Image (cartoon, rainbow, N blue to C red):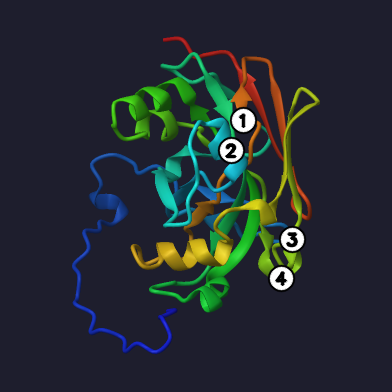
Amino acid sequence: MLVARGRSRPALRRISRVTASAPDLVFPARPLPTVAVVGETARFPVRRIFCVGRNYADHAKEMGVEVDREAPFYFLKDAGSIVASGATIPYPQGTKDFHHEMEFVVAIGAQAFQASVEHALEAVYGYAAGLDMTRRDLQAKAKATAKPWDFGKNFENGAVIAPIVRKADFGAIGAQRIGLAVDGVLRQNSALDDMVWSVPELISHLSHFYRLAPGDLIYTGTPAGVGAVMPGNRIVGTIDGLPSVELRIGPAETA
């Protein structure tokens, strides 16, 4: 467990957890979502998905807001929203404005609790390219009425991810390019060092509100150039040093 330097570790109160063995379930549980790891046969099990909002100033500007350095903010997606790169997903229900957002994803591989910025990267297992798919019209409606973003952000197939590359194989996070094209036309093009909040800062900050643990994913925000996609579109997102993330949009499902 990572703890903030210079502080004593508080006594931990025993917390009861509700669990059940498979025979005790009233219906079969959904299989645990997992992500492929480059060079490994074992897969990365997904526990939780944290997403960072407005972590590139140019994207915040195109959304009509300004970024300050007071503190990052987040929204969550269910682990069940994970879909592997290369999939074809149906155009989602309830929206007429479905958007792509290209993101650098951090895969947590060790516990982090009240971690310092200096030691935050010790909790990282690896990195991946991901897509935070968004029902933009539903998100905009929620913003306008000061309501949560869940309908706009947290839905089936809303968190796309490519295979994870181990931290040591990727190397230091710096000026690697991050970009996205739809049907071969470039829409997003930036660099990882354009993030407002760095990866160590994000991990440290989150670890003061959650006990980060193996299996957690952090989608670290998107640069400018987000836009709508339609059935038939092919999305390809790239980050230097990582496998690309690819997605096709299929027709909407019918009953």
Q: Which residue matches tag 3?
A: 39
Q: Is residue 213 visible?
A: no
Figure label count: 4
| Vertical position of residue 146 compared to residue 217: above or below | above
Separation (CA) of disc 1 from disc 2: 8 Å
Amino acid type at circle 3 is: Gly
Sequence-earlier tag: 3 or 1: 3
Comparing marks 3 and 1, which lies closer to the viewer?
Answer: 1
Q: Which residue is painted at 41% across and 35% down in the image? A: 154
Q: Which residue matches tag 4?
A: 168
Q: Position of residue 94 (x, y in %)?
A: 41, 16
Amino acid type at circle 2 is: His
Q: Which mark is residue 59?
A: 2
Comparing marks 1 and 2, which lies closer to the viewer?
Answer: 2
Q: Are marks 1 and 2 in contact (CB under 8 Å)?
A: yes
Q: Which quadrant of the rendered structure holds the C terminus?
A: top left
Separation (CA) of disc 2 from disc 4: 29 Å
Sequence-earlier tag: 3 or 2: 3
- Name the quadrant containing residue 30: top left
